Each structure stands twice: as structure tokens, then as C-alpha cells.
Amino acid sequence: MSTALLMAADAGFTIQGPLVVASWEMFGMTWNLTESVIVQWIVIVLLAVLFIVLGSGLKVVPTTRRQALAELLVTFVIDMVDGSMGEKYKSYRPYVGMLIIYVVVCNLIGLLGLRSPTADVSVTATLAIITFVMTQYNRAKTGGVKGYFKAFVDPMPFMLPSNIIGEISNPVSMALRLFGNMVAGMVIGGLIYFALGSFMPPVVIPAIASLYFDIFSGVIQAYIFTMLTMSYISNAECE
Amino acid sequence: MDEMKILANAIVLGASALGAGAAMIAGIGPGIGEGYCGGKAVEAIARQPEASGAVTRTMIIGDAIAETTGIYALVVALLLLYANPIFGSLTSALEKFGG
């Protein structure tokens, strides 16, 4: 009887991590080329083609719909950066624009049947670490060496441990937030298909759930990730 | 020996499922927090409709921060269900015990 229980647990619904396409040994470590990386390459190629098409043959007065769309995107990014970071963070516009478009496309590519790269903690952690490095860079740049270390003993020296923990928990929470939301969408989608499998063909109900968990949640989480990146970077500025 | 292994595995499976369920009790916190946040945003927009854009942006960021603990609980629950770390130590303990 106990064996039957274990077998039932095995046969049930499971979530697979990203597939490992290839792996090799280098510097004493195993390096895996996973599905997430492949899907990210696809996203990068798609975005590159899109931007080359959007950015070619621009005129001062837009005459084509293509250029109107390109200007809409650029204005959106510029307004977002200026609104939450201010005019002096002009140089962050390309990164922020890339980040939001890339994360939105990575979240939504799950709709095409590929596995969302953002449902892999190593991808979201990479993006969060980039934000963390930029935060530290901005603090060091605006405050110098003295200002950088002074920010950690602010307002009192005994706050040092909690400041360090607070600094490290930012990228951790950003990475896990995006990852958790995308995996939750994937798990709930899988559970709905699994539950419907025995009663009826999976129509209508998965579509409604997907509308919220994939589309709404994916776009909102990308926006939140970008907004948090911008506010962490501009909050790190030393006086 | 085999039966004991099965029993031990069953206990760990059941306890992990209970633990995953218990971890998701943390969903209460973000629920209350986000509800409060949304309610206050509605109040603010009712008072000052022209600031609705800025209020909504701030509300979404606040929601995201409030959600963090819930997401941590979700990650713990998913770990317990799909990538259970306890099974590894159980296997090694059984090997040591059973020889």
C-alpha cells in the first residue's frame, strides 16, 4: 500500500526545471547550457531584428507608422526615466529601456509555448545583480570612497549590520519576486491543465487564467522590476 | 528495511506537503497589506483625481514591496513540493543507518 502511495505521488503533476541542453567541465565546475539561455538568445535575436526594423530610415518628421511606434517606445522610456530618476540620469535611459522591453518579452514568450526564461532563478538573479552593481557604482560615483562607506554607518554606526543586510536583500527580493511570480503562473497554468485533463477539453478556463497569470502579471512584474531598479539606483545617490 | 524506507519517505512526503501548505499562510500578510495600499490609493485619487498617474505608480511599487514576504513563502512552498532538499539528507541518513 505504501508503495502505491509513492507511485501515485510520482505519477502526479510535477514542474520541471529548465532542460539542460549541453554541459561541459571547465575550471573544475560543471557548466550547463540550459533551455533558459537558448530562449534568451531567441528573445535577443527577435528584439534585435525588431529594433533594426524600427530604427531604420528615420526622418525628422515621421511619415511612417513604423517610426511613430519607435517614437512612442522611446518617449515612454524617456518619460519613465525622467519621471522617477530625474533629468541627470539621462545615461541610464538605454539600460532601463532595454530592461523593461527584454523582461516583458521574456515573460510573454511563455505564451508561444517556450519556457519563460524569467521562470529560472539564475536569469532573474543575473538581472538583479546587474541592478545591485549599478546601485553600488552610483553610490561610489556620487559619494566617493568616503561617502560610499559613510552611507553604511548612516545614521548611527551600530546600524552597520542592518544596513548591509538591507543592501543585500534588495537584489535577493527583486530576483525572487520576478521568479516567484513567473513560476507561480507556470505552476497554476500546469495545475489547471492537469485538473481539467480528466473532465473536459482544456478550453476557456485556462485562457482566462492565462490572461491574468501570464499577460497581466508578466507585464506588471516587468514594470515593477524596472521601477525598482530605477528607484534603487537613484536612492543610492549620496548627498 | 525496504518497508522502513518507504515509511520514512512517506512521512517526509506528507510532512513536506503540510509544510508547503503551512508556509502559504504567509499569504495573509501581503493580502492585508496590498488591500490597505489599494484602499488608500483610491482615497488619494478620489481626493485628487489629477494625481492619479503618480498615485497608481507609487501604489504598484508599494504593492510589489508588500508582496515580497508572500513571494518568499511561495518560494519555500515550491521548494518543498518540487525540489525537496530534505530527501537528500533522508537518503544519506538511511544509507548510514541501514549500512
Image (cartoon, grey):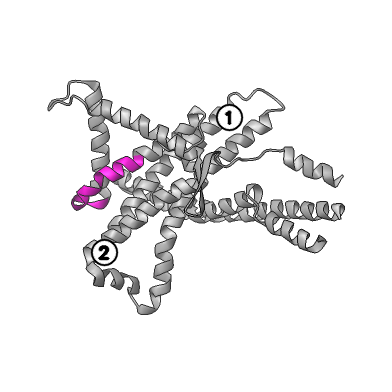
- Which residue extends farthest top? A64
Q: Nearer the viewer, residue A174 or A127?
A: A127
Screen quadrant of the N terminus of chain A = top right
Q: Kindly identify the amino acid type of the residue bearing the numbered disc 2.
A: Ala
Q: CA distance from mark 1 to mark 2?
A: 48 Å
In this picture, residue A166 sits left or right of residue A51: right
Asked whether the viewer can see residue A154, the reply is yes
Q: Kindly identify the amino acid type of the residue bearing the numbered disc 1.
A: Pro
Image mark for residue A206 = 1
The residue that appears at 45% across and 39% down in the rendered structure is: A37
* Residue A98 is covered by the magenta coloring: yes
Q: Nearer the viewer, residue A164 or A35?
A: A35
In this picture, residue A65 sits left or right of residue B67: left
Span shown in magenta: A85-100
Label 1 or label 2, whichever lies nearer to me, is 2
The residue that appears at 46% across and 36% down in the rendered structure is: A38
Crowding near the residue tagged with mark 1, few <14, some 14–19, many ≥20 C-alpha atoms within 10 Å: some
Image mark for residue A140 = 2
- In x, y percent, where is residue A216? 45, 36
- In x, y percent, where is residue A197? 68, 28
